[in-house]
Image: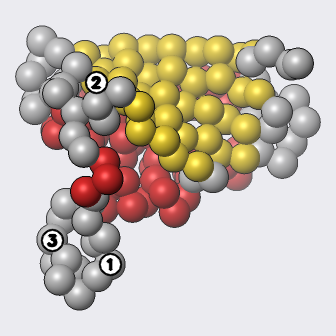
Amino acid sequence: MEKPKNKMEISITSDTLNLEIVENFIREMFLKYNIDKGLFTKVLICVNEAVVNSIEHGNKFDKKKIVVIKSYYCHNYLYFKIIDEGEGFDYKEIIDPTSDDNIFKESGRGIYIIKNMSDAIVFRSTGNIVEFKVKSDEQN
């Protein structure tokens, strides 16, 4: 069985100003491992949505708490794991932001975006860990 390769990881404090660090992390990953540049925007949006959720809802903007972003490439997929230090949430109760009752509400949009732009999304632990993958058509 092929082992994951191209593992990378960063930790940031819970401040949305650190999204620039996250973008640079993703850019470095794409350059270092020659990943199809056409996937960059999709990956960046998904990772940013997960990180913003971790900062805002998980760590509640507490700058003493960190968000960890782990990634690796394996079997033509880019895998991401976003971990925060929050209490988590019941991911089974996520609202559908496209329903008539919720169309003007802001909550639930980040997860909705990740679900629709990634190839799979999973919540671990108490909901303070989100994992998703994005398919790459290239063989690295």
132 is higher (above) or lower (below) than 28: below
Residue beneath disc 1: 98
Decide: marks 2, 1 in contact (CB < 8 A)? no
Residue beneath disc 3: 105
Instruction: Please give the name of the residue rendered at 25% of the width and 57% of the height, measured from the top-left corner.
Output: 93
Residue 81 x %, y %: 48, 28
Q: Residues within 10 Å of mark 2 (few under 14, many from 20)?
A: many
Numbered mark located on residue 40 in the image: none
- The amino acid on which the numbered mark 2 sits, given as a three-letter code, is Asp
**In the rendered image, is residue 20 in sight?**
no
Q: CA distance from mark 3 to mark 1?
A: 9 Å
| The N terminus - image quarter | top right
Instruction: Please give the name of the residue rendered at 36% of the width and 14% of the height, measured from the top-left corner.
Output: 11
Of 106 and 131, nearer the camera is 131
Element assignment for label 3: loop
Of 78 and 18, nearer the camera is 78
Drawn side of residue 5 relative to residue 84, left or right? right
Q: CA distance from mark 2 to mark 1?
A: 27 Å
| The C terminus - image quarter | top right
Residue 90 x %, y %: 24, 45
81 is higher (above) or lower (below) than 11: below
Of 32 and 122, nearer the camera is 122
Image-quadrant location for residue 55: top left
- The disc, 2 or 3, on the residue closer to the chain's N-terminal end is 2
Instruction: Please give the name of the residue rendered at 19% of the width and 77% of the height, measured from the top-left corner.
Output: 102
Residue beneath disc 2: 84
- The disc, 3 or 1, on the residue closer to the chain's N-terminal end is 1
Image-quadrant location for residue 60: top left
Image-quadrant location for residue 127: top left
- The amino acid on which the numbered mark 3 sits, given as a three-letter code, is Lys
Element assignment for label 1: loop
- The amino acid on which the numbered mark 1 sits, given as a three-letter code, is Thr
